[in-house]
Structure formats: structure tokens, C-alpha cells
Amino acid sequence: MNQLNVGLLGAGRMGSFHGESIAKRIPEANLYAIADPFLGAAEKLANKLGTNIKTYTEPLEMMQDSAIDAVIIASPARTHASNVIAAAKNGKAVFCEKPMAITIEEADNVLQVVQEMKVPLQVGFNRRFSKGFESAHNEIVSGKIGTPQLLRSLTRDPALGNPNKPEWTIFLETLIHDFDTLLYLNPNAKPIEVFVMADALVRPDYKDKGLLDTAVVNIRFDNGSIGIAEANFQAVYGYDVRGEVFGSEGMLQMGSIRESNMTRFTKEGVSYDTCRYDQDLLFDAYVAELKSFVDAVNTNKQTTVTGEDARSALLIARASIESYKLNQPVKIENGVLI
Ligand SMILES: NC(=O)c1ccc[n+]([C@@H]2O[C@H](COP(=O)([O-])OP(=O)(O)OC[C@H]3O[C@@H](n4cnc5c(N)ncnc54)[C@H](O)[C@@H]3O)[C@@H](O)[C@H]2O)c1
């Protein structure tokens, strides 16, 4: 079998999962190398996942390795744009974790280089590969629930952890999933207005250090529909990712917090266990997105989630930041904030 040789950049939480998928869950790909600037991190993961995996501490050196066909970028968000550009300039196909970039200018630079180098690019919006969300998209496209009027996407992480987060994390790294989901579930619609309310309700003591841990983003689209994206960093009952689309002919709901389909009936009542970890709740989607990327590169097909899709979600994130700062709605026209 012709295997795609993959170089993994970033051996942290998400990189470890993607590395394991390439090494063990996707036979059409081979985990050829791992790079991580943190001394020993790449070696540790390489030893866990195989025997002949090359390691680098200098990401650029790995990008220049001519045996590598594709690079998976799972480094911290603020390094993504420069890493995608470096990988593309070395002719590699790129899978980049979300967000693809932090600013619109960065995103446009990425898109330009990727286009010039004619390399495939896929961005890690894994919810598109989660069965319920994918089915909902297909039903909406086929007109099953008529015209979308109200859309909702939400993310509630189980625990805030370290409250010292990079600025605007809730919009750029968490709600970016929901912005992409709303766009996915509202095909061809463009956002025209965004209004945000956000706060630090989990850790109010960190608000003056810039933490926002709770947010609601209202989005008006050019097809008349209205979307709501909401997030909170501490849902005591588990990891919660759900969506809903209400249309002129019906409604679709997607997402479940259940850990399995077992339901417990006792004298206390009825209950079930919930997922406490994103990689448990969305395990299949994380594997499916990488499989789709590998298939697209191996067979010369268009990747499923493009750089343009990532720019569209980022634009709503940037509008959200602007709306939060101004405490008023902001408008979007022709792909730019006005
Ligand atoms: N799609 C999802 O649902 C999802 C979930 C979690 C994380 N992520 C994304 O994955 C990325 C990584 O998150 P994580 O939770 O694994 O973080 P992490 O901190 O666990 O891992 C990041 C790794 O990158 C390494 N690193 C630091 N600077 C680097 C650089 N300049 N170049 C290459 N590597 C560098 C670090 O040493 C670390 O090993 C983030 O962009 C995050 O948004 C996506």
C-alpha cells in the first residue's frame, strides 16, 4: 500500500492523539517523524507510538525533510499560521489544528501561500465529522427542515484548569468550533452582524487579567437566519457539545453528553454517565477528520474543511472580539469587518 509519510508538529495533548491515529488507526498513513521544541517531548511520544519514528526539536528542520509528504500541526494556536506557511513552502500537504490563524491578515497570508504552492490544506474542525452534525448538514442541504431560521451551537468544557489563558481564547480557540458549526449547518449563508455578551463567571477574580470564561455570540446571517454560539469553560456535569437548527419545516438537534448508551434505573431515579474529556466524546470525529485528510491527499481530492472555511470562522471570532470591546453589534460586509 502507498502510505502517506506524515510529520507531526507538537507532541502535546492533541498532537499525541493525532500521532496515535496516524500510527495505529489509519493504515493509509505512516507516522514518519515528530517535532516538538520542548526537549524530550517528541522522543517520548515517538517511543510510545513506534520504533522507527524520527524526532526533531527544530520544527523547520522537520518541514525540510524530503521524505515527508504531509505535516500535521498541533502546536499552540499562535504558532499555526507561520507553521502552515513553512510547511506549504516546503511543498507539504497540511492538516492544521484550529484556529488556522489568529488575525485575518495572517489567514490571508496563509491562503495566499497555500494557493501559490498548490498544496492541500485541511483545518481541524472535527465536529463536521461527528455523525449527528454531518447528518444534520446533509438534511439541511436536502431541504428536509425547510429554510433555517434559528441555529444554535454550544461548547461547555468540563473544567477551566489554568485561568491564565492567552487573550481572547474563548473566541479564537473554543467558540471558533461553534462558528464553523453554524456556517456548516447554514450552507452558503454569510454572517452580516455579530453581537457579544461575555464575562468571567467561573473565575471572576481573573477578569481583570483578561479572562473570559463565558460567552454568548449572536450572529445575523444574510439569508435572514439568526445564530447563537455559546461557551462556558466549566460544566460540572461533563464535556458538552450540542447543536440545533430550527427551520420553516422542522428542527434538528445534534450532540449528546452521554458516555455510552447505558441508562441506569435505580430507586434514586434514572441516570447515565457523561463524557469528561473531548477525546472521548469526539473520538470518532477526530479519527475521521484525519482519515478524510489522508484520503484526500492520497487520491488528489479537495480536502473537506478548507483554509477558506477557517477564515470564515475566524472572521466571526474577530467580529466577536470587536463587539466585546465596543459593547455593541458590529457589521461584516464582503468578508471584512466594517
Ligand atoms: N480540535 C479540537 O477539538 C482541539 C482540542 C484540543 C486542542 N486543539 C488544538 O490543538 C493545538 C494544541 O493543543 P494542545 O491541547 O495539544 O496543547 P499542548 O500544550 O498540550 O501541546 C502543544 C505542544 O506544542 C509544543 N510547542 C510549543 N511551541 C511550539 C512551536 N512553536 N512549534 C511546535 N510545537 C510547539 C509544546 O511543547 C507542546 O508539546 C491547539 O491549537 C489547540 O487549539 C484542538
Image (spheres, rainbow, N blue to C red):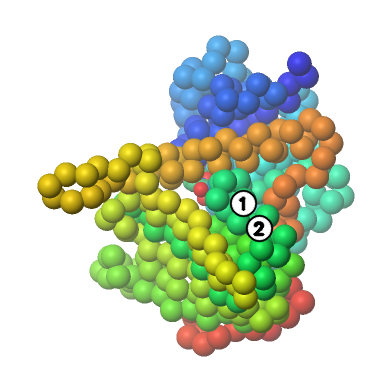
Residue at disc 1, secondary structure: helix
Q: Which mark is residue 135?
A: 1
- Residue 72 lies left or right of residue 208; in this view the side is right
Find the residue positioned furthest to the top: 51
Q: Position of residue 16 (x, y in %)?
A: 50, 32
Q: Nearer the viewer, residue 239 or 174?
A: 239
x 70%, y 79%: residue:
222
- Name the image quarter holding residue 92: top right
Relative height, residue 254 to residue 48 (above, below): below
Task: Name the quadrant of the C terminus.
Answer: bottom right
Asked whether the residues under the numbered discs 2 and 1 touch, taking CB atoms below 8 Å apart as contact, a structural biologist would say yes
Q: Position of residue 145 (x, y in %)?
A: 63, 67
Q: Is residue 174 visible?
A: no
x 16%, y 44%: residue:
266
Name the residue that disc number 2 marks. Answer: 139
Q: CA distance from mark 2 to mark 1?
A: 6 Å
Type of the residue with mark 1: Ser
- Name the image quarter holding residue 180: bottom right
Relative height, residue 252 to residue 274 (above, below): below
- Residue 9 lies left or right of residue 90; in this view the side is left
Find the residue positioned furthest to the bottom: 328
x 66%, y 63%: residue:
144
Residue at disc 2, secondary structure: helix
- Residue 64 lies left or right of residue 36; in this view the side is right
x 28%, y 53%: residue:
237
- Residue 338 lies left or right of residue 34; in this view the side is right
Q: Position of residue 46 (x, y in %)?
A: 52, 21
Asked if the beta carbon under badge 2 is closer than 8 A to the nearest atom of ligand 1, the reply is no
| Dot 2 alpha-carbon crowd within 10 angstroms: few under 14, some 14 to 19, many 20 or more | some
Asked if the beta carbon under badge 1 is closer than 8 A to the nearest atom of ligand 1, the reply is no
